Image (cartoon, rainbow, N blue to C red):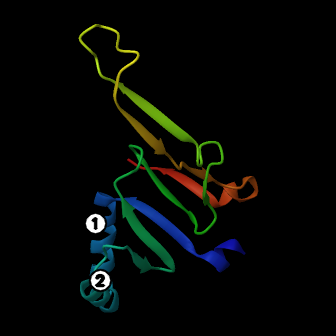
Amino acid sequence: MQMNMNGVGFIWRAADFEILEAFVQANGFNTADQALKEGTVEGLHYLGADHYWSNDHTAGHVFAGVKKVERLGILRGTYGRAHTIDFPAGPSDGNSTNYKSGRSFYSRVDIGHLTPTSLKPLVFDITVG
């Protein structure tokens, strides 16, 4: 049911995606024409699935599964928390605790990744050679 609603996606290694791309172009005039006209930089749709490529895989692994299952969100623990960094000046008297050459203020937002437990069977880590 989830697959019919959201579709299926594969994220290939770049070298494997080139093999898939060549196969798609060799096995049909329409897909070859579409790939040549539109390009495949953002991926391609073939055999009812969306195929993408990435260089951010763990060695020997690719990713596949039902799309729109995983969630990204802002982590509450670090959101809006202010941080400071003091830069000591290093005066000639050797007492650098009282002298500052500057102070840096920053805040950060961390993004978290969540796959709901009930939907984990729809996400696959595929070992490739």
Q: Secondary structure at mark 2?
A: helix
Q: In which quadrant of the rendered image does the N terminus lie? A: bottom right
Q: Given contact means CB atoms under 8 Å apart, are the residues at marks 1 and 2 in contact?
A: no
Q: Residue at x 53, y 50 (%)?
A: 109
> Along the horizontal axis of the image, is 72 left or right of 57?
right
- As drawn, 6 above or below 90: below
Picture coordinates of residue 42 (x, y %)? 36, 73
Image point 44% across, 62% down: which residue?
11
Q: Can you identify the residue that label 2 sits on? A: 35
Which amino acid does the dot numbered 1 rest on? Glu
- Vertical side of 81 occupied by 25: above or below: below
**Which label sits on residue 42?**
none
The amino acid type found where label 2 is placed reads Ala
In the image, residue 110 lies at what x, y percent? 54, 48
User: 29 or 63, which is in the foreground?
Assistant: 63
Q: Position of residue 47 (x, y in %)?
A: 47, 79
Residue 18, numbered label: 1
User: Who's the residue at 60% across and 54% down the image?
Assistant: 74
Mark 2 Cα shell of 10 Å, populated few (<14), some (14-19), many (≥20): some
Quarter of the image for residue 26 reads: bottom left
Left or right, residue 10 beside residue 114:
left
Residue found at x 58% / y 76% = 7
Is 47 located above or below residue 92 in the figure?
Answer: below
